[in-house]
Image (tube, helix red, strand yellow):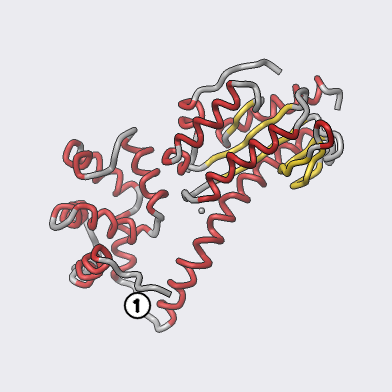
Amino acid sequence: MEVINQGLSDILDSLQPLAVEWQDDVARRVIERMRQFPVKAVYSEDDVRAILENGNFGDGLLILRLFLGFSKDQFSGLLIDALGEGGIGIKRYKANTAGFLATLTDMGILEAMAAETSRESHWSDTLVERLRSGRGSAMSGQKRGRAVEDFAEQIVRKVFDDLFDVRVTFVGRQARTAKCDFAIPSRDNPRILVEAKGYGATGSKMTDVIGDIEKIIAAKRGDTAFLFFTDGLTWKQRRSDLRRIVEYQNNGDITRIYTSAMATQFESDLRQLKREYGL
């Protein structure tokens, strides 16, 4: 398999779309503004503009995010992906108001506003929201991560059939061990290791991936190929972590980094490694 050095931009450009008083001053301001929000059958960009310009801009952005039901990182990632690198604050808005509003419209803000303001309330809504923001948030993060693992596994299985172990502790040099998602052909004598991680929100789990990677690097044999498969726009808010992973690839500790958009290359490289290792 050809040795190459990947760049941070290569990975970023291929990413695609995780009992106290909770109300602070921001929450109280936002709640008051939402209570005064006009109910209409149809909304326009002028209504979105009013949310952002008639009051605190940050509060307005938060209200729009709540309408869309996105986490802060999801919302920021989608805006930056559409508008280009840079912030999403008031300076960016003033510099390109038309583009900013058009992007929000493309994200479905007008439909979301109409749907939410016309929704008939039920006593269970409060409990459902507590479930969504608590357990639902955690489950969504798990599902996003598992979706990337499942996607990578489909390709691994396509190339190697059943000749691999899934989510195991493998044995490497000097009987060292570490966990990985796929060990090919087996955990006891892996020639190829694949770690798959997907993220939709920032947090400790994103930082933990560095530790997981370092454990694999420390345990694997020098002649074992190590492929890292990932995705999720949240990496754009965690560039320092992703840059560190790219450095491991440039140093030869990771053979290659892939995203879902690089699935064809991932499959091609697996087939080449299969030939090289005689598997």
Residue 46: x %, y % from top left: 17, 53
- Where, by quadrant of the figure, is residue 161 drawn? top right
Q: Residue at x 18, y 36 (%)?
A: 95
Residue 233: x %, y % from top left: 46, 42
Task: Work out which residue is located at the far bottom of the displayed protein and give it.
Answer: 123
Q: Residue at x 86, y 23 (%)?
A: 278
Q: Is residue 108 above or below residue 250?
A: below
In the figure, is residue 70 to the left or right of 35?
right
Q: Name the one closer to the observer, 160 or 243.
A: 243
Q: Residue at x 84, y 41 (%)?
A: 162
Q: Name the one closer to the observer, 52 or 110.
A: 52
The C terminus is located in which quarter? top right
Task: Work out which residue is located at the far front of the displayed protein and give it.
Answer: 174
Q: Which residue is mark 1?
A: 120
Q: Name the one closer to the observer, 58 or 17.
A: 58
Q: Residue at x 22, y 72 (%)?
A: 35
In the figure, is residue 248 to the left or right of 182?
left
Q: Is residue 269 above or below residue 64?
A: above
Residue 213: x %, y % from top left: 64, 37
- Where, by quadrant of the figure, is residue 48 drawn? bottom left
Tag 1: residue type?
A: Glu
Q: Is residue 101 above or below residue 142?
A: above
In the figure, is residue 263 to the left or right of 15?
right
